[in-house]
């Protein structure tokens, strides 16, 4: 085998080795580790920020004291089952009010869910016998991007929904995810706050920032080894056609001698 044949053979072998390595690599996620469980501090006493109702929010309201009526508003027989179990929905208008049966426009923007529920119940006590008002904010959501199995928009079933629950809803982290660098982008997108959380440390579970807020963006990046592997695969994809061409040329050269 002359020098040119040896060179082509060595380069081909090197590319095959890189491709083989890149395909076999698989990251095992290690989460919530700690050297000594006794070293984990007690859960932070810092209260999670309570969401305050804003214009364009959608409120689900029902009177638990009356199964046939939602806040004393008659419903049709056909819709009775669905409406009674879920409650009716009401949009908070731009003027911060919500239009409710018997009460008219009631200002609720700026109130927490509990404050709004208590306030509306007090107003209905003047019109109804012992109402028990249940109020939910049903449009709260977060966006999950990056290395999870199912990216997308996820609704918050309650105000204090932990990050771990949403990641679980998204199918969990992929093998390429950097569990040490989970970013939460929060607040005004013109000047957002960015928090970085380390899910390999069990102490993160006591971090109040792990409680999600409306319109949070959660981004899970790839870890370094996955990025390096991706670069190797990209290089391999570029070089493989070249090697195939060189091998073809070598075969033709050998046959024509």
Image (cartoon, rainbow, N blue to C red):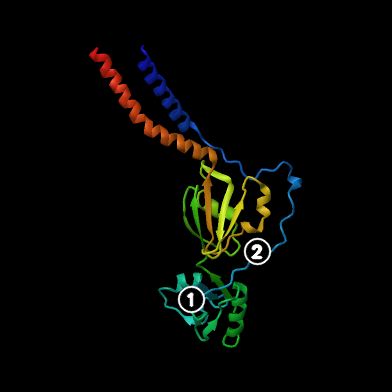
Identity of the residue drawn at 54% across and 70% down: 137
Number of numbered discs: 2
From what the image shows, is residue 142 above or below residue 174? below
Estimate how packed mark 1 is, as few (under 14), some (14 to 19) or many (20 or more) residues with alpha carbons within 10 Å. Answer: some
* Image-based side of 204 in relation to 220, left or right: right
Q: Which residue is mark 1?
A: 90
Q: Quadrant of the N terminus?
A: top left
* Residue identified by numbered label 2: 48
Seen in the picture, residue 249 relative to 75 is either above or below; the reply is: above
- Residue in view at x 52 percent, y 64 percent: 190
Q: Residue placed at 60% from the left, 88% from the top?
A: 126
209 relative position to 176: left or right: right
Residue 99: percent from the left, percent from the top? 49, 82
In the rendered view, tell whether residue 39 sits above or below residue 245: below
Of residues 85 and 38, the one drawn nearer to the viewer in this rendering: 38
Query: CA separation, marks 1 and 2?
Result: 26 Å
């Amino acid at each position: 085998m002359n020098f040119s044949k040896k060179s082509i053979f060595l380069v081909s072998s090197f590319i095959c080795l890189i491709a083989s390595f890149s395909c076999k690599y698989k990251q095992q996620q290690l989460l919530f580790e700690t050297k000594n469980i006794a070293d984990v501090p007690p859960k932070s006493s810092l209260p999670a920020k309570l969401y305050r109702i804003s214009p364009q929010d959608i409120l689900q309201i029902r009177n638990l004291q009356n199964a046939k009526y939602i806040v004393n508003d008659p419903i049709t027989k056909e819709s009775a089952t669905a409406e009674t179990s879920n409650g009716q929905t009401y949009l908070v208008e731009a003027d911060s009010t919500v239009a409710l049966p018997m009460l008219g426009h009631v200002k609720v923007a700026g109130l927490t869910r509990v404050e709004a529920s208590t306030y509306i119940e007090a107003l209905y006590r003047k019109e109804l016998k012992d109402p028990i008002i249940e109020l939910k904010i049903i449009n709260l959501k977060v966006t999950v991007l990056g290395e999870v199995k199912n990216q997308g928009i996820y609704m918050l079933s309650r105000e204090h929904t932990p990050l771990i629950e949403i990641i679980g809803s998204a199918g969990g982290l992929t093998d390429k995810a950097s569990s040490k660098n989970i970013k939460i982008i929060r607040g005004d997108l013109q000047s957002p706050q960015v928090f970085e959380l380390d899910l390999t440390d069990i102490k993160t579970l006591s971090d109040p920032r792990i409680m999600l807020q409306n319109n949070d963006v959660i981004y899970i990046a790839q870890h370094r080894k996955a990025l390096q592997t991706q670069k190797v695969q990209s290089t391999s994809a570029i070089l493989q056609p070249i090697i195939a061409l060189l091998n073809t040329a070598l075969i033709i050269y050998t046959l024509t001698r």
